[in-house]
Amino acid sequence: MDSRPVKRVKLDSDSNTSNGLPGNSDAASIRAKRTAFLNSISRSVSPPGISRSGTNTPTPKIDALPSRQDEAITRVSPAQNDQSESSHDSTSSKPASRVKCIPSPFKLTSIRDLPSSQNNDTVSLHDILGNPLIKEAWIFNFCFDVDWLMTFFDPDVRSQVKVKVVHGSWKRDSENRIAIENACTRWPNVESLTAYLPDPFGTHHSKMFVLFTHDDSAQVVIHTANMLHQDWTNMTQAAWQSPFLPKLKDKLQTSIGNIGSGSRFKYDLLAYLEAYGSKTRAVREQLSDFDFTSVRGALVASVPSRMNDFSIAKGVDELSSQKLWGYPSLFRALKAISAQQAEHPKRSHVVCQVSSIATLPMTWLDQFFPTLSQKPSAQMWNSISIIYPTPSNVATSLDGYSSGGSIHTKAQSAAHLKQVTTLRRTLCKWTQGPKEECRAGRHQAAPHIKTYVSFAEKPTANLRPDVNWALLTSANLSTQAWGTLRGKEKEVVVQSFEIGVLVWPELFAEDFDTSEQEDNSSRDTKSGDKVRMVPVFGSDTPHAVEDSNHTSTLVGLRLPYDLPLTPYANGDMPWSPQGTYDTPDRHGRRWARDFRG
């Protein structure tokens, strides 16, 4: 048996295709090696003794992400540097090689019925689950089609991968629970686990994969899609993928760094998983053995909980020691960002892009929007936009009205209409924008994605502002997801499970202060590294340009919507699945008469 390589073999984007380069094996040889590997994992020999490069099955496109051997998460591949320099040379005679360009930390999912030109740098479910080295998968979600889900694992290991399906249908008579458990009987390697929800209005809405592989690595993927066919075909979704994480060299490492560091991310992730109780003990124990140093991002999550009024604690250090969920968790992270940024833009503008708007009391809006905008409630309305589709946006989408079943708000009763009136000044359509270079290419794919992005200024036709921070999450605009302050008890109550990742420019600086002792003592820091995060469209990597502010690092943020935003017209209303729409969709169907039965 060949000896294992010390490090993971770095995958090339062309590694699974025959391109005539020296060293390529013929198909029969590759298949033979693969068969030997598959046979080896069924024996008591662990780990398998074949290198990763000996397989022929398509694997997740992790080459676009930083590998665990990269010196820092901000490194980019030579191919990306060449692309950036080439792009710049076509527009300027001065080289821009000193500007390091980093791909977006969030990736859009591929859309089946859009051309390949609009699916650049996207990720599919096969990319995530198709790796034949996966040995165990923990899948947290709201809705599941288990039989469909299992088709995305590599066919040769599909029946061997240990799969844990975690959902919130804990009542024994729940139709969803019965359907999931019936499907699990057809897959002996799949186990259904339920998350307890003490509040009848709470949901298990988190969407996450935790993957373990035979070559002793792990990966965390946080995303926005249900485990359903429709969610992964023609609806706009996105995912954040951690690098492949190696085992800890020193299992006694206990230091927890600043918010945004890998060790803090790990600490918060394990705390989140602890909320499930003993059912997640196995995944917690496994993750404890992995090194999260290469991760950059803050975990912002919700679990059913009650917390003391967090506003009593003013400072970042005081907030850091508390277990916070929902909007208090977001508030803490934003306070940390403000402390890291040299100056907070006074004209910042937050865009909330969601697929559901619940009933939102004015008292809650006065809590939540000031948290997002970091401005007093009297100034918040000019600093907030909400992207939510109209009936026309849904009707003209690729799946027509059928995609509207996943997009929710109520607009029928007097109370509902009053809320629409309150929010109207902020509401924007899910539609194509006027500037071709600022089009995301997703206006035809109805949105199930949820993003919250703070721009330095409000985007206009003549201005594409930098990004202060961005959150990709499962959480829509609801009190259940984010929590609400109950005055009498002076406590914040969160009812649902949600999970998301927050990123900001300073994370990607080579001198980012993680406060992780081993990380900081061994790293050659570079003082004064100026990092900008900028919107990108059509691909993940920004183009290097001449910059008067001496930018050293440029980070892309792949937006799912076009800029500038398109506000609702006077007669526009938000889509509501409880409504009746007689205008035919792109497939000639009307809602809801053609969808009954």
Image: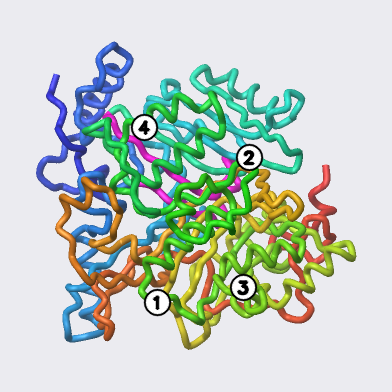
Q: Which mark is residue 385?
A: 3
Q: Foreground residue, 180 or 287?
A: 287
Residue at (73% x, 38% y) in the render: 199
Q: Amino acid at mark 4?
A: Ser
* Distance CA(mark 2)–CA(mark 4): 24 Å
Query: Depth-wise, is mark 3 or mark 1 nearer the camera?
Result: 1
Q: Which mark is residue 288?
A: 4
Residue behind mark 2: 204
For marks 3 and 1, the one nearer the N-term is 1
Q: Amino acid at mark 3?
A: Ser
Magenta-drawn stretch contains 231: yes
Judging from the image, what secondary structure is the residue with disc 3 in? strand
Q: Foreground residue, 168 or 266?
A: 266
* Distance CA(mark 3)–CA(mark 4): 39 Å
* Distance CA(mark 1)–CA(mark 2): 38 Å
Query: Depth-wise, is mark 3 or mark 4 nearer the camera?
Result: 4
Judging from the image, what secondary structure is the residue with disc 2 in? loop
Crowding at label 1, few (<14), some or many (≥20) Cα neighbours within 10 Å?
few
Query: Depth-wise, is mark 1 or mark 4 nearer the camera?
Result: 1
Regarding residue 61, the answer to whether it shows in the image is: no
Judging from the image, what secondary structure is the residue with disc 4 in? loop
Q: Position of residue 355 (x, y in %)?
A: 65, 58
Is mark 1 in CB contact (under 8 Å) with mark 4? no
Q: Foreground residue, 314 or 361?
A: 314
Q: Which mark is residue 318?
A: none
Relative height, residue 79 to residue 209 (above, below): below
Pick the quarter of the image with the N terminus.
Answer: top left
Crowding at label 2, few (<14), some or many (≥20) Cα neighbours within 10 Å?
many
Magenta-highlighted residues: 215-242
